[in-house]
């Protein structure tokens, strides 16, 4: 399945591993009717070449939800052809249509290629993430 292959490429990019059960659960949540988890894919010549996973969540500073672009990946051989930009724009357009408060995402500070793309949507907001593993 295309999403799974791309998901594996995304995890490899981050040199990360996710147990198969978690991958299966994530995919099941994306397919479920609950709008909390969803995904968009990019197609080139009828082939899925990229995906973005989205988590829609409540937000204490607004009565409207926030859309978190959780994962974004485009197959290496088709990068630079506009797939990444198209998926982000699609999610922003969806958020505008559905009345979300914001669409936001995070990336590593040194991910220069991704940030070149992201900087064309909005400037980085200066927040720094802290994470306590449990
Ligand atoms: C980040 C990523 C999703 C961008 O996808 P993409 O389809 O290549 O992006 P686009 O084709 O829409 O590129 C848009 C911009 O990004 C930059 N860019 C993307 N790929 C590039 C490349 N190979 N070389 C130079 N610039 C590049 C350019 O500034 C480009 O601007 P342009 O549209 O004016 O030419 C893709 O590079 C990727 O999957 N990277 C690995 C995983 C990753 O970093 N994910 C993001 C984690 S938060």
Image (cartoon, rainbow, N blue to C red):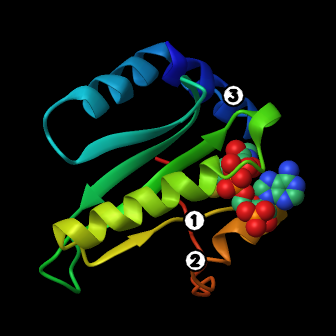
Q: How packed is label 1: few (under 14 Cα within 10 Å), some, or many (20 or more)?
A: some
What residue is at 60 percent from the left and 58 percent from the top? 85
Q: What's the residue at 53%, 19% (across, down)? A: 2
- In the displayed structure, would residue 96 be above or below residue 15? below
Q: CA distance from mark 1 to mark 3?
A: 19 Å
Q: Secondary structure at mark 3?
A: helix
Tell me the distance, in whole angstroms, between the alpha carbons under discs 2 and 3.
Answer: 25 Å
Marks 2, 3: nearer the viewer: 2
Can you tell which quarter of the image residue 77 is in?
A: top right
SS assignment at label 2:
loop
Mark sitting earlier along the chain (2/3): 3
Q: Earlier in the sequence, mark 1 or mark 3?
A: 3
Image depth: mark 2 or mark 1 in front? 2
Residue 64, visible in the rendered structure:
yes
Q: Badge 2, how many Cα within 10 Å: few under 14, some, many 20+? A: few
Which numbered tag is attached to residue 121? Answer: 2
Residue 19 position in % (x across, y down):
52, 19
Is any part of residue 114 visible from this angle?
Answer: no
**Mark 2 and mark 1: Cα distance apart in space:** 13 Å
Q: Position of residue 24 (x, y in %)?
A: 39, 18
Q: Ligand 1: which quarter?
A: bottom right
Q: Is residue 109 left or right of residue 124?
A: right
Residue 9's disc number: 3
Left or right: where 19 falls relative to 85:
left
Say above or below: 85 vs 54. Answer: below
Residue identified by numbered label 1: 106
Instruction: Mark 2 or mark 1: name the one nearer the start of the chain.
Output: 1
Structural crowding at the residue carrying mark 3, measured as other residues with C-alpha within 10 Å and reported as few (<14), some (14–19) or many (≥20)? some
| Ligand 1 has an atom within 8 Å of the beta carbon of the residue at disc 1 | yes
């Amino acid at each position: 399945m295309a999403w799974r292959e791309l998901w594996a490429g995304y995890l490899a990019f981050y040199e990360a591993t996710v147990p198969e059960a978690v991958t299966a659960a994530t995919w099941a949540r994306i397919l479920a009717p609950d709008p909390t988890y969803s995904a968009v894919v990019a197609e080139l010549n009828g082939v899925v070449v990229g995906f973005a996973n989205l988590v829609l969540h409540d937000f204490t500073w607004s009565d409207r939800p926030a859309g978190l672009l959780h994962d974004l990946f485009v197959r290496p051989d088709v990068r630079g052809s506009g797939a990444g930009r198209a998926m982000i724009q699609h999610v922003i357009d969806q958020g505008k249509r559905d009345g979300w408060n914001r669409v936001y995402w995070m990336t590593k500070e040194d991910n220069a290629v991704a940030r070149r793309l992201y900087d064309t949507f909005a400037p980085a907001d200066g927040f720094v993430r802290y994470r306590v593993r449990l």
